[in-house]
Amino acid sequence: MQKPYNYWMNMTKEILRQVKDIKSVRQNLIGLEKELLSRGDKPEVSLQSLPMLDRAIWGLRKGLTVIAARTSQGKSALALQIGLDTAKQGVETIILSLEMDVESMLERMFCSECKINNYELLSGAFRLNNSHQVKFEHFRKQMSELPLLLTCGIGKTFGEVNQFIEMLNPKPKVIVLDYIQMSKSSFNERTEMAEYIRQFRQLMLENNIRGIVCSQINRQIEKENDYKPRLENLKGTGALEEVADVVMLLHWNYFYTRKEEQKNDFDLFVAKNRFGATGHRKLVYHPEYYMFSEREDEEEYTKI
């Protein structure tokens, strides 16, 4: 089918913009030298709640990081933990949820920060427990002072994200989108999602933002009786695998076995890392707190 005239006009404008931004090798080397001299002995944006993983991948980098897992295997919990982690460091952070309302996100953060069992809140214990109420007052004060913005429903299209970022001053340094399969498509879901992902990463690079996108894993792996996720299992589009700078795949074996002794065992695979090594790290998952931690006896990052 022949492309419409506006399509080619927009493409020409984009090419002209890119040509205008081209610099000589000498200019680029000057920029690289400044960048290298500016780096310290810690990542610019760290994962302080997961220090060993942070050291292995050297923090969050500008561009696109994908967190992928099967349904109910912790991708939203990890995304919220990372968002709260960066905000507590004073880093301007936005969480765009296409699945949960703001109150639900805050409740999960309350459980995580104050080590309160989610079932106690669900079953009405907060009203009767003075200790929980005291903790909530501390949580309220802490959260009110953080550079953290939570939204529900913004991000169904790339245009929404782009317009939202343009409105903000200062610009955020971290954006979390949970999750990409909830984005809105009108014609060809696979093609539109791929374009969304590419534009999202470009927006992150142009604005020096660490973008984190959650993604589901295809159910196909269950049919093969091999539950550990792989890059090719990313759902809906190959663009996630191609465009992402870092891909972290999550695996909670307890979800399949329901063996109580495996409840807290969790695997995180860095399956792609444009900036360094890939590898496997065993984490401890506390589902009642929506929280991840690291094992003190864990060996060094296992390369894959």
Image (cartoon, rainbow, N blue to C red):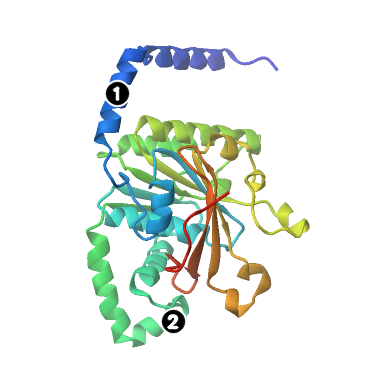
Q: In which quarter of the image is residue 73?
A: bottom right
Q: In this view, does 102 lie above or below 62?
A: below
Side of 198 relative to 221 (left or right): left
Q: Say which element carries label 1.
A: helix
* Residue at image location 39% in from the left, 72% down from the top: 111
The residue sitting at 32% across, 20% down in the picture is 29
Vertical relation: 54 (above or below) 9: below
Label 2: which residue?
120
State which quarter of the image contains the N terminus: top right
Residue 138, picture quadrant: bottom left
The residue located at (49%, 64%) in the rendering is 283
Q: Nearer the viewer, residue 222 or 72?
A: 222
Viewed as shown, does residue 172 lie left or right of 125?
left
* Residue in front for this viewpoint, 191 or 272: 272
Near mark 2 (Cα within 10 A), the count class, few <14, some 14-19 or many ≥20, is: some
Image disc number at residue 94: none
Q: In this view, does 28 lie above or below 68?
A: above
- On the image, the x and y values in percent for residue 110 come to 36, 69
Q: Is residue 36 visible?
A: yes
Where residue 190 appears, as percent x and y from the top left, is 64, 37
- The disc, 2 or 1, on the residue closer to the chain's N-terminal end is 1
Q: Which amino acid does label 1 sit on?
A: Gly
For disc 1, the marked residue is: 31
**SS at badge 2:** helix
The outermost residue toward the bottom is 128
Question: Of the residues tagged 2 and 1, which is closer to the observer?
Answer: 1
Locate residue 222, reporting x and y percent.
Answer: 73, 58
| Total marks placed | 2
Q: What residue type is labelled 2?
A: Glu
- How far apart, in angstroms, are the residues tagged by discs 2 and 1? 53 Å
